[in-house]
Amino acid sequence: MISLVQLLREAQGNPKAIILAGAPGAGKGYILRGLDLGGLKVMNIDDIYINMLKKANVSLDLKNATPEERSEQAKQMAAANKEFKGDIASTIEGKQSFILDGTASSYNTTVKLKDELDEAGYEVFMLYVYTDLERSLSQNQNRYEKSGGEDRSLAPAIVMRTWKSVTDNLPKYADLFGNNFVAVANTLDDRMQDIDKIIDKYLKPFTPTGTKPKTPAQIEKSKIQKAKDKEEIQAMLSDDFIYDVIEYTMSKEEAQTRIKQFLNSWI
């Protein structure tokens, strides 16, 4: 049986790119595992970052990092970003079809990439996977331990910010990609809906220590921003908000069918 990647290689037409979007722990890989993607190139900055952290002898348990480890992690992430951008550029230059496995938390960065791909003659598709904030935090919290120290867990405050950005981006991505967009919801049956309880359970136990002292002005600015973020996230945990999100989604099977159709559309 011929695989989708073989069809891609044999097809006479434009290269294709699938951009994955979703918070950490959303289950993007779970959707793709049901597809025969053969050897289609999958690009993920985490692969580079994790390898660099290991070489630098830095723990992948980022949620429990010391000040020294956080400093080294930042250096390695900057290096990983530089290498990853080069990999993306060479892949586009070579007109290779690929899957970009990331969060797509930055709308502006994703728009810029899509424009670049469009200009290079690519057909571009987005698979967006929504999940609850609690599931995202829980999956992240357990990732390092479950992997036996081979996969990284992020600081939960970063996970929450990423979740907020990715969730905010859902309607904008639906508009941006049009017919080349599918969304799937991967949610908990019984989820926490109180932001204070979520913070108490998932963020406070991992509050960073040894951080650089802030000025009174910086403390006040941070306090205002945190209050604003809490209010906005609390609204995003409501049933009404979740119902609006679900309106954009389809079943896993429907999404997989749409992806297959996208990859086969040259034939």
Image: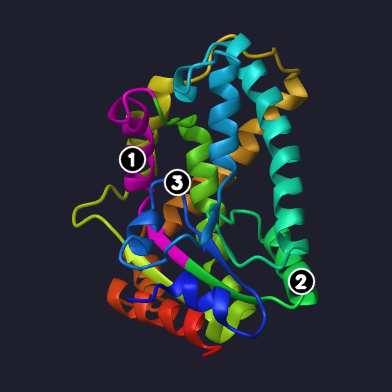
Q: In which quarter of the image is residue 2?
A: bottom left
Residue 145 in the magenta stretch? The answer is yes
Mark 1, Cα crowd under 10 Å, few <14 / some 14-19 / many 20+, is some
Q: Main secondary structure of the magenta part?
A: helix
- As for residue 70 lying within the magenta part, the answer is no
**Visible in this render: residue 196?**
yes
Give whichever of discs 3 and 1 has the lower sequence position. Answer: 3
**Label of residue 187 in the image:** none
Q: In which quarter of the image is the N terminus?
A: bottom left
Relative side of 159 to 252, left or right: right
The Cα atoms of the two marked residues, 3 and 1, are separated by 8 Å
Q: Earlier in the sequence, mark 1 or mark 2?
A: 2
Name the amino acid, label 1: Gln
Q: Where is residue 167 in the image (x, y as percent from the top left)?
A: 50, 60
Q: Mark 3 points at which residue?
A: 24
Residue, disc 2: 115
Q: Which of 215 and 118 is in front in this view?
A: 118
Magenta segment: 128-149
Local SS, label 3? loop
Q: Earlier in the sequence, mark 2 or mark 3?
A: 3
Badge 2 local density, few (<14 within 10 Å), some, or many (20+)?
some
Mark 1 sits on what residue? Answer: 139
Mark 1 element type: helix
* Disc 2 and disc 3 in contact, CB within 8 angstroms: no
User: Label 2 vs label 3: CA separation?
Assistant: 25 Å
Category of crowding for the residue at label 3, using alpha-carbon neighbours closer than 10 angstroms: few (below 14), some (14–19), many (at least 20) = many
* Discs 3, 1 touching: Cβ within 8 Å: yes
**Foreground residue among 94 and 48:** 94
